[in-house]
Amino acid sequence: MSKAIYVLNGPNLNRLGIREPEIYGNTTLAEVEAMCRYAANGREVIFRQSNAEHELIDWIHEAIDNSCAMLINPAAFTFYSMAIMDALKMYPHPVIELHISNVHKRESVYHNSLMSPVVTAVMAGVGAKGYGHAISMLLDMVSDDK
Ligand code: DHK
């Protein structure tokens, strides 16, 4: 049986759609989840969000043995969570770091991702629709591994 794609979302993303729509748009997290499931084209998607660092770390550990690929938006943890960075270092499958906004066009605090050096690829600035594109890219990466 083929393994799932994990989609993990960090703090404040539960408020997508009403949180700073001028930056993050009007798409809700539930709509993002539906987009991911559609793009996965039948492959199982484990879709989760947490405002707690330890939960994201536990889910990354869980995904090591239970997934074929990961899409992660660590949100604010991106820039300071060495614990999440260290967990991602242990993740052996394709992983894409995604940001809805172009973090490099924002305040300097958003310019240095601790995650980017330890993931497969990075996507930023294409809006919430990037989640669907990232899932498609992960499917390609997984199929290329065969
Ligand atoms: C989401 C957040 O919550 C911010 O803390 C990040 C990211 C940007 C996004 O664009 O998806 O800095």
Image: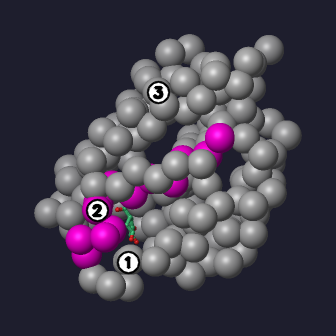
- CA gap between label 3 and label 1 equals 26 Å
Magenta residues (range): 94-106
Rate crowding at label 1 as few (under 14), some (14 to 19) or many (20 or more) other CA atoms within 10 Å: some
Sooner in the amino-acid sequence: mark 2 or mark 3: 2
Residue for badge 2:
102
Quadrant for ligand 1?
A: bottom left
The answer to whether mark 2 and mark 3 are in CB contact below 8 A is no
Q: Residue at (61%, 55%) from the top-left corner? A: 119
Q: Residue at (33%, 85%) from the top-left corner? A: 108
Q: Position of residue 43 (x, y in %)?
A: 61, 19
Task: Identify the amino acid type marked 1.
Answer: Tyr
Q: Residue at (60%, 64%) from the top-left corner? A: 117
Q: Which residue occupies the foreground of this view, 79 or 19?
A: 79
Residue for badge 3:
136
- In the image, residue 105 sits, relative to residue 2, either above or below, namely below
Q: Position of residue 19 (x, y in %)?
A: 27, 65
Sooner in the amino-acid sequence: mark 1 or mark 2: 2
Residue for badge 1:
110
What is the quadrant of residue 50 in the picture?
A: bottom right
Q: Position of residue 71 (x, y in %)?
A: 55, 45
Task: Report if residue 96 lies within the magenta region.
Answer: yes
Mark drawn on residue 124: none
The secondary element bearing badge 1 is classed as helix
Sooner in the amino-acid sequence: mark 3 or mark 1: 1
Q: Is mark 3 within 8 Å of ligand 1?
A: no
